[in-house]
Image: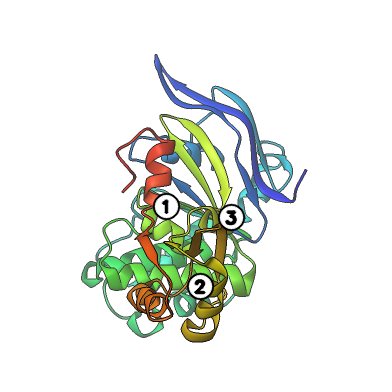
């Protein structure tokens, strides 16, 4: 067994006759960002609500930090920060005042936890502004500040970038990456937008119709689904030398006597072609692969794509 902060065994939730989540086998390693990806209605929020003990599973097992989540719930959930759906704050109070109320309700936090959390999410200079005057990005960041002010070991974030503008998305992405890298915080983040998840996640779990179809390491996935330009030509050995000496890349694979695939410098494919022709190689055809992550996920969930 690996060092998993979250592990579920055949986790299932049934609502009357409708299956919300079925036989979920989730593995979230310590100190990583795990992206739970799927269309709206795939079962992501139900899964997170079960993990946070907000919804009781129909069957199955949840292990948090290696122990059954019901064993010492107070101790376990103190280690977790979360945002499920939109964070609720008082419109007529400042960000700091909202956090002070939450801190009093929770009953435990580090002395400078509020100031530290506001600083971490970049809201230190906005402490006198009323929540009603916050931008959507600022509201989401305050939600994250509320989730991290007790310095949790793990964050569970349900669609934290939903509805944000590009600047807000960039801010949240940068913050999550830094939190994982600098603090070692484990993060489980859900989204229906592949392009956002792939920029932050170390591992992706793909959900569809309540089932987890696959868990895959992003580094492996990128290798499997890299774009390339493929040349069919008369002499692959000469082509390889030209790629290294004149284009400046060694990131290629010779597939057979006539085919070479280049994974780097795709924007220089015209220059490559010209270089081959000028050196008396006969190029019978070349094309850029259309294999992209979107295609991979579309195939996995049966067409239609994600996001």
First along the sequence among labels 1 and 3 = 3
Point out residue 20 in the picture as x, y percentages from the top left corner.
Answer: 43, 27
Could you tell me if residue 93 is visible in this image? no
Residue at position x 48%, y 42% in the image: 206
What residue sits right under mark 2 in the picture?
A: 239
Q: Secondary structure at mark 1?
A: helix
> Could you tell me how many numbered marks the image carries?
3
Q: Are marks 1 and 2 in contact (CB under 8 Å)?
A: no
Image point (73%, 41%), residue name: 67
Q: Which mark is residue 293?
A: 1
Q: Secondary structure at mark 3?
A: helix
- Picture coordinates of residue 298 (x, y %)? 37, 41
- Quadrant for the N terminus in the image: top right
Disc 3 residue crowd, few under 14, some 14–19, many 20+, Cα 10 Å: few
Q: Is residue 8 above or below residue 189?
A: above
Residue 208 placement, left or right of 126: right
User: Could you tell me which secondary element the residue under label 2 belongs to?
Assistant: helix
Disc 1 to disc 2, how far (Cα)? Answer: 29 Å
């Amino acid at each position: 067994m690996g060092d998993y902060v979250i592990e579920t065994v055949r986790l299932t939730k049934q609502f009357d006759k409708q299956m919300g989540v079925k036989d979920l086998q989730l593995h979230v390693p310590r100190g990583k960002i795990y992206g739970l990806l799927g269309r709206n209605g795939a079962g992501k929020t139900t899964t997170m609500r079960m993990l946070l003990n907000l919804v009781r599973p129909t069957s199955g097992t949840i292990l948090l930090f290696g122990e059954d989540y019901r064993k010492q719930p107070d101790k376990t959930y103190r280690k977790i920060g979360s945002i499920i759906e939109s964070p609720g704050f008082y419109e007529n109070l400042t960000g700091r005042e909202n956090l002070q109320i939450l801190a009093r309700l929770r009953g435990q936090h580090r002395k400078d936890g509020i100031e530290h959390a506001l600083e971490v999410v970049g809201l230190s200079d906005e402490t006198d502004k009323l929540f009603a005057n916050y931008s959507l990005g600022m509201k989401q960041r305050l939600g994250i500040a509320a989730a991290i002010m007790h310095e949790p070991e793990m964050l569970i974030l349900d669609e934290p970038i939903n509805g944000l503008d590009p600047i807000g998305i960039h801010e949240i992405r940068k913050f999550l990456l830094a939190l994982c890298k600098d603090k070692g915080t484990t993060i489980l983040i859900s989204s229906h937008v592949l392009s956002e998840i792939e920029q932050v996640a170390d591992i992706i779990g793909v959900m569809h119709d309540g089932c987890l179809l696959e868990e895959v390491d992003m580094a492996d996935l990128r290798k499997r689904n890299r774009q390339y330009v493929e040349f069919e030509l008369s002499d692959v050995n000469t082509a390889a030398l030209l790629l290294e000496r004149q284009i400046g890349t060694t990131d290629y694979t010779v597939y057979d006597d006539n085919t070479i695939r280049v994974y780097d410098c795709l924007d220089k494919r015209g220059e490559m072609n010209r270089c081959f022709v000028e050196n008396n190689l006969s190029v019978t055809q070349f094309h850029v692969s259309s294999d992209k992550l979107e295609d991979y996920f579309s195939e996995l969930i049966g067409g239609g794509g994600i996001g």
